[in-house]
Image (spheres, helix red, strand yellow):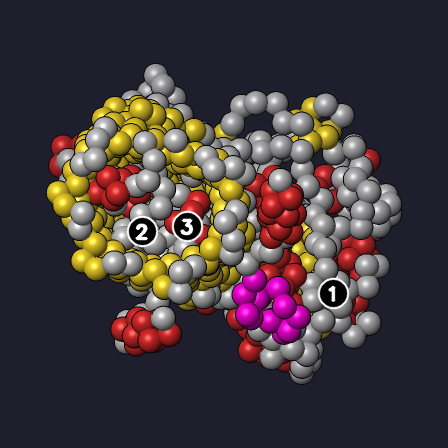
């Protein structure tokens, strides 16, 4: 065990430590408690997300998992040059998940997963110093994933399924840094669209080469959320502002990037399970947020220039007794945001996630799962340099520091 | 279920764990006031200090007054609260006993956009006297000597012109002086920017007032007169002595040139386009006047230079406006008016612009204003009047420099040079440049005299930089790019 850990840590040297964009890694209470590993863990219906191939290895005819977390995230922003200090007042985020599996026979299993892997909710004080970039944003995407897994042999299973996504976005920002009506009310626009749908898929492979060792691989495709004709509500526009700024519709696209995960799990000393996951997320897909309006408002081009990211996850489970399992984990999450593109709508730099949790078996069928995540961000000096006024870039930056806590609860049921 | 309770308690505890920076700007000592003490900051001045813009004193303008911006910055370095005698609305007009006595603000309105005064009824009633004291002791149109006048805040003197409605609405008593109300607050730090109106009201009136240089009794001055430099010197000395009596440190600002503001630089002297035929016709109409001038020279009334200066001549292309000039030799005995064509040294007022080219008498096509009908004394500043203003300005600035030069506690801030830069390339900020170009330059509000909020932010920064340099302070500046310029209705 120690060897394995030190090997993994060695592997990390030279790579920087990092968290990601609007990805929210809370897709199962059991697995979150283990650093959100799970591509090679066979334990519950949560596998529908982590690796659909492994549901054919689950015990029991049917498995259910249900869970939710409350994300308490805060960001502090300060700019020493201009004496600015701001805090987000972000409402509680509540990612949830529901998974069900059904074993049709020895080699065939079906499942259904509903989970929320992408989302972002940030609320700055209205008209704050970065209001020309964002006042508030709320992004939600619910994934619905029917799943099938086929056990090819006792050592190998494959699985996958289509993913249906239903998303919603609300974003409010001021049109620029100073425009207002004659009463001084700042001119702003709210973009709003619900029910944006798109399709994708996931594929997984689970290999059990030797006893106690599992190796897993999972791919989740990229999904482009395409908003057509969303509501653009312009407020406090001066009546005589040249051009048509009446309420309008907007078109925009937001990519939910593809994610490749591979990893392993290893059981040792009877009571311990170690898991390691490596995620590669193709964030480079997100080049710019381009919002086009069908009135005279100029097309809003917001370069993002995200880069692909890697996440390293380590988890440990200890079966204290028959009724109680304890879990802990750590992960190093790389931010896709590059220097000069640090926008306050997703003020996330590299982070380290510390997780813990437990499962308590109420009876042979039902267990209660609890998890806790603390995401640690170093404070970072960065800026968003690609907002333009009069054709010149106007940087907005300073020192950011975020903290995220996410306590969660879940239920697992096995038949 | 025990677990649930435990987790809930833990979660509640963590809500309080807000992210904190290692070196927060809210930590003690993040910024320093140096050798200055900003705990009680009092500003004294006229419209520029009050936050006047767009022809009125309105709420948003007051929010962006340069002393209010400075006070907000001072709050990081030991500054206390800063109160202002806020008006009631964003229209800006004042009423006295229900009747409007000062106009509302200008906004850009219509298609195409033109400066337009808002027509709604303002709600700031002067007789609703505010309870002070107010850190910002400033009143639009105050001249230097007004700050010492104990009649200036007496509401009953407003109709007589001896009192100022802006001051009367917050004066501590009907016999209070502005400087007295300022000093009574025991400022630890002050700003003083006064003297602009001692020349500016003469200038904006087109020079209809009198240059009172040599007359040391301000009680005899009209509202549009130029203050005698000796009076200014004595007044300024008294103001400074009052403000520094308790050991307060402070800043004073010098006086910008009127030629650096769009009110005087927007309308060109040669604003009349003409074709050859019209020019010939116009010259024919002035043949009698031109001929009379020749006779006057022969008669020894005027010399050749004045003949050349006064001879009216229009040609195809842009032509100089015809203006009245009271400094010309009076030839009324010959039946000749004191008129000539303008030169680049004359300044045409912004308010004259809409009149130029229109008919003074709608039934008479020859009564084109600026051509057949000369601009009157109040519509232009002649070169002679410009010189009077410049002479007084120079004298005032010399006094300010002299009176503050030996006092290490008082910094003289050269706002004059900054304002001049606005008409000479502009001042740059992170999203562009502000210039003195009327309505579009971003530096001046729609009255053509007072800065925009962004302009005031620049002024605040210029002052703050000097405070930091001279008093060893580290007060943060403000970002002009985040301030508004002109408002569109």
Q: Quadrant of the C terminus of chain B?
A: top left
**Labelled disc at residue A41:** 2
Q: Is residue B359 left or right of residue B401?
A: left
The chain letter under disc 1 is B
Residue B165 in view of the camera:
yes
Total marks shown come to 3
Q: In terms of image quadrants, where is residue B253?
A: bottom right
Kindly report the secondary structure that dominates the magenta region of the rendered protein: loop
Label 1–label 2 contact, CB within 8 A: no
Label 1, on which residue?
Answer: B39
The chain letter under disc 2 is A
Element at badge 3?
A: helix
Label 3–label 1 contact, CB within 8 A: no
Residue B62 in view of the camera:
no
Residue closer to the observer: A363 or B429: A363
Q: Position of residue A84 (x, y in %)?
A: 53, 58
Q: Is residue B91 left or right of residue B296?
A: right
State which region is magenta.
B20-32
Q: Residue at x 45, y 30 (%)?
A: A236
Element at badge 2?
A: loop
Q: In terms of image quadrants, where is residue A221?
A: top left
């Amino acid at each position: 065990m120690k060897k394995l850990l030190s090997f993994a840590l060695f592997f990390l040297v030279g790579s920087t430590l990092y968290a990601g964009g609007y990805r929210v890694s809370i897709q199962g209470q059991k697995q979150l408690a283990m650093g959100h590993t799970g591509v090679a863990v066979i334990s519950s219906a949560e596998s529908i997300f982590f690796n659909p191939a492994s549901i054919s290895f689950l015990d029991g005819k049917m498995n259910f998992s249900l869970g939710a977390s409350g994300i308490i995230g805060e960001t502090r922003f300060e700019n020493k040059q201009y004496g600015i200090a701001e805090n987000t007042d972000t409402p509680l985020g509540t990612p949830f998940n529901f998974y069900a599996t059904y074993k049709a026979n020895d080699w065939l299993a079906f499942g259904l997963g509903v989970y929320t892997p992408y989302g972002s909710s940030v609320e700055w004080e209205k008209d704050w110093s970065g209001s020309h970039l964002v006042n508030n944003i709320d992004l939600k995407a619910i994934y619905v994933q029917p799943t099938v897994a086929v056990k090819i042999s006792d050592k190998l299973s494959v699985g996958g399924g289509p993913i249906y996504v239903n998303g919603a976005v609300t974003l409010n920002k001021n049109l620029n840094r100073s425009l207002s009506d004659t009463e001084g009310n700042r001119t702003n626009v709210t973009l709003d669209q619900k029910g944006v749908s798109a399709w994708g898929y996931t594929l997984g492979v689970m290999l059990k080469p030797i006893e106690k060792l599992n190796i897993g691989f999972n791919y989740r495709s990229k999904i482009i959320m395409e908003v057509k004709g969303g509501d653009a509500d312009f407020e406090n526009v001066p009546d005589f502002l040249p051009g048509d700024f009446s309420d309008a519709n907007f078109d925009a696209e937001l990519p939910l990037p593809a994610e490749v995960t591979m990893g392993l799990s290893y059981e040792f000393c009877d009571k311990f399970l170690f898991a390691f996951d490596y995620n590669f997320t193709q964030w480079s897909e997100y080049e710019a947020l381009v919002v086009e309006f069908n009135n005279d408002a100029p097309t809003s081009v917001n370069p993002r220039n995200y880069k692909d990211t890697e996440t390293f996850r380590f988890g440990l489970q200890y079966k204290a007794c028959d009724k109680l399992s304890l879990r802990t984990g750590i992960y190093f999450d790389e931010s896709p945001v590059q220097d000069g593109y640090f926008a306050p709508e997703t003020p996330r730099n590299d982070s380290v996630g510390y997780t813990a949790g437990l499962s308590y078996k109420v009876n042979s069928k039902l267990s209660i799962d609890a998890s806790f995540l603390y995401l640690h961000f170093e404070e970072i000096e960065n800026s968003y340099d690609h907002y333009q006024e009069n054709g010149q870039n106007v940087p907005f930056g300073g020192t950011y520091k975020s903290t995220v806590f996410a306590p969660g609860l879940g239920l697992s049921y096995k038949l | 279920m025990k677990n649930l309770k435990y987790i809930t308690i833990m979660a509640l505890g963590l809500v309080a764990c807000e992210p904190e920076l290692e070196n927060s700007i809210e930590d003690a000592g993040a910024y320093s006031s140096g050798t200055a003490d900003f705990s009680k900051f009092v500003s004294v001045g006229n419209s520029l200090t009050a936050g006047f813009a767009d022809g009125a004193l309105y709420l948003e303008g007051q929010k962006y007054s340069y002393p209010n911006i400075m006070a907000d910055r001072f709050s990081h370095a030991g500054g206390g609260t800063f109160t202002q005698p806020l008006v009631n609305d964003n229209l800006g007009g004042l009423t006295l006993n229900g009747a409007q006595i000062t106009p509302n603000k200008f906004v850009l309105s219509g298609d195409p956009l033109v400066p337009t005064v808002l027509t709604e009824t303002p709600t700031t009633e002067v007789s609703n006297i505010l309870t002070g004291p107010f850190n910002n002791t400033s009143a639009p149109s105050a001249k230097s000597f007004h700050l010492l006048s104990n009649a200036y805040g007496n509401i009953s003197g407003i109709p007589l012109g001896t009192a100022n409605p802006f001051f009367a609405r917050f004066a501590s008593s009907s016999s209070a002086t502005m400087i007295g109300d300022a000093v009574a607050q025991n400022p630890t730090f002050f700003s003083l920017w006064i003297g602009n109106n001692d020349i500016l009201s003469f200038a904006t009136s087109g020079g209809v007032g009198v240059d009172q240089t040599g007359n040391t009794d301000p009680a005899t001055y009209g509202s549009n007169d130029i203050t005698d430099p000796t009076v200014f010197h004595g007044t300024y000395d008294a103001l400074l002595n009052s403000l520094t009596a308790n050991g307060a440190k402070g800043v004073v600002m010098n006086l910008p040139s009127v030629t650096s503001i769009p009110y005087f630089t927007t309308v060109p002297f040669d604003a009349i386009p003409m074709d050859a035929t019209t020019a010939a016709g116009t010259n024919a109409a002035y043949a009698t006047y031109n001929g009379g001038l020749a006779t006057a020279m022969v008669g020894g009334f005027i010399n050749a230079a004045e003949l050349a200066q006064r001879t009216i001549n229009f040609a195809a292309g842009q032509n100089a406006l015809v203006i009245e000039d009271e400094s010309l030799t009076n030839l009324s005995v010959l039946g000749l008016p004191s008129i000539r064509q303008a030169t680049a040294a004359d300044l045409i007022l912004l308010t004259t612009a809409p009149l130029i080219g229109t008919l003074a008498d709608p039934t008479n096509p020859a009564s084109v204003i600026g051509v057949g009908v000369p601009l009157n004394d109040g519509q232009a500043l002649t070169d002679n009047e410009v010189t009077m203003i410049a002479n007084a300005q120079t004298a005032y600035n010399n006094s300010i420099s002299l009176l503050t030069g030996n006092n290490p506690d008082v910094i003289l801030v050269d706002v004059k040079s900054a304002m001049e830069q606005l008409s000479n390339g502009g001042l740059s900020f992170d999203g562009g440049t502000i210039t003195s170009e009327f309505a579009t330059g971003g530096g001046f509000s729609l009255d053509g005299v007072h800065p925009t909020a962004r302009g005031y932010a620049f002024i605040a920064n210029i002052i703050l930089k000097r405070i930091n340099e001279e008093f060893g302070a580290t007060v943060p500046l403000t970002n002009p790019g985040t301030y508004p310029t002109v408002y569109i209705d």
